[in-house]
Amino acid sequence: MPPLREIRDHMQSIGSIAKVVRALEVVSTATSHRLQERVDRTQSYAVRSWEMLSHLAAADDALLSQHVALKGHGEGGPTGLLLFSSNRGMAGGYDTTVIAKAEEFIAGSPEQVRLITIGSRGHEAMLRRGLGIVADFSLLDERSELEDVTPLATLVLEGYQQRQFGRVAMAYTEFHRGALLRPRIRHLLPVQVTPVARVRQYIVEPDSEQLLEMLLPRIIRFQIHAALLESFAAEHASRAVALRTATNNAEDMIRHLTQDYNKKRQQVVTEEMLDIHSGVVALERRR
């Protein structure tokens, strides 16, 4: 068993680390709750706007059905993949799961995949694997607003319209309460229209094609922003759980070290008492 001073120093060191970890846990928990509220506020609009696009695409319109955003380019081409990851560690398996999902998608893609990374962890992981990265938007964080996503959405739309991408998808982590990590691949372009149970015919002015040209950039930008918020909410929820586990482990370690310290101290006290007793017995014999 190590000496008392070493055990005591170890306990103090772990206690200091536990205080820092506990503070980080509080920050991540508060950030996660704040992001949960933002996700809840944006989720309805994200779903409804995509439903609007689905209704518009399902309309019986010959010109609209030939639009490149709905029909696609009709030929193979590089796939653009937006990879959402974190900029910091201590988030449990958050980055591992989404990067593994992206790698699975890349391995199964018949075309070359060109990456747009959001988050330094994913950026570094893909660089180590020698994959082509078109752009990096790792400066985006949980405080980013819808306007901050405009350059990313513009890059995606222009790259698709100029046939730099044959299709575009997103690899991100869906937010679920309880820090359940569920990475997802979602296709953005060409728009994979969800089936509409009842197709209603609307009178659209000036025409459906112009309406699609106006709505598409806004809807795509909002879908990317919603995925960004979900990713950050899942990241901070995962980090809060990981830090809570680390705090509990530190407390368990301190408890075990305290027991070892008390045993060692009792052993030292016992040995000192035996030495004193032996000295007393030796003196009495000399008399």
Image: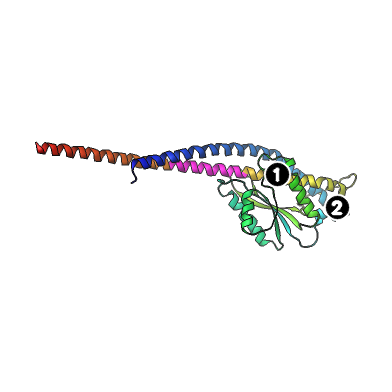
Colouring style: rainbow
Badge 2 element = helix
Q: Which kind of residue does numbered mark 1 sit on?
A: Ala
Is 30 or 205 nearer to us in this picture?
30
User: Which quadrant of the figure has residue 177?
Assistant: top right
Q: Residue at x 64, y 43 (%)?
A: 232
Magenta residue check for 250 = yes
Q: From the viewer's perspective, is 272 left or right of 89? A: left
Residue identified by numbered label 1: 226
User: Which quadrant of the figure has residue 132?
Assistant: bottom right
Residues rendered magenta in the picture: 234-252
Q: From where the camera sits, is residue 154 visible?
A: yes
Image location of residue 180, percent across then percent down: 59, 47
Which mark's residue is nearer the viewer, 2 or 1?
Answer: 1
Q: How crowded is mark 1: few (under 14 residues within 10 Å), some or many (20 or more)?
A: many
Alpha-carbon span between mark 2 and mark 1: 26 Å
Q: Residue at x 44, y 41 (%)?
A: 14
Q: Residue 129 carries which label?
A: none
Q: Residues within 10 Å of mark 2 (few under 14, many from 20)?
A: many
Q: Earlier in the sequence, mark 2 or mark 1?
A: 2
Q: Which kind of residue does numbered mark 2 sit on?
A: Leu
Count of all numbered marks drawn on residues in the image: 2
Q: From the viewer's perspective, is 281 left or right of 29? A: left
Badge 1 element = helix
Specify the quadrant that holds the C terminus: top left
Q: From the viewer's perspective, is 169 left or right of 263? A: right
Residue identified by numbered label 2: 64
Is 197 or 264 nearer to us in this picture?
264
User: Which quadrant of the figure has residue 145?
Assistant: top right
Image location of residue 80, percent across then percent down: 72, 55
Q: Is the magenta stretch mostly helix, strand or loop?
A: helix
Image location of residue 167, percent across then percent down: 75, 56
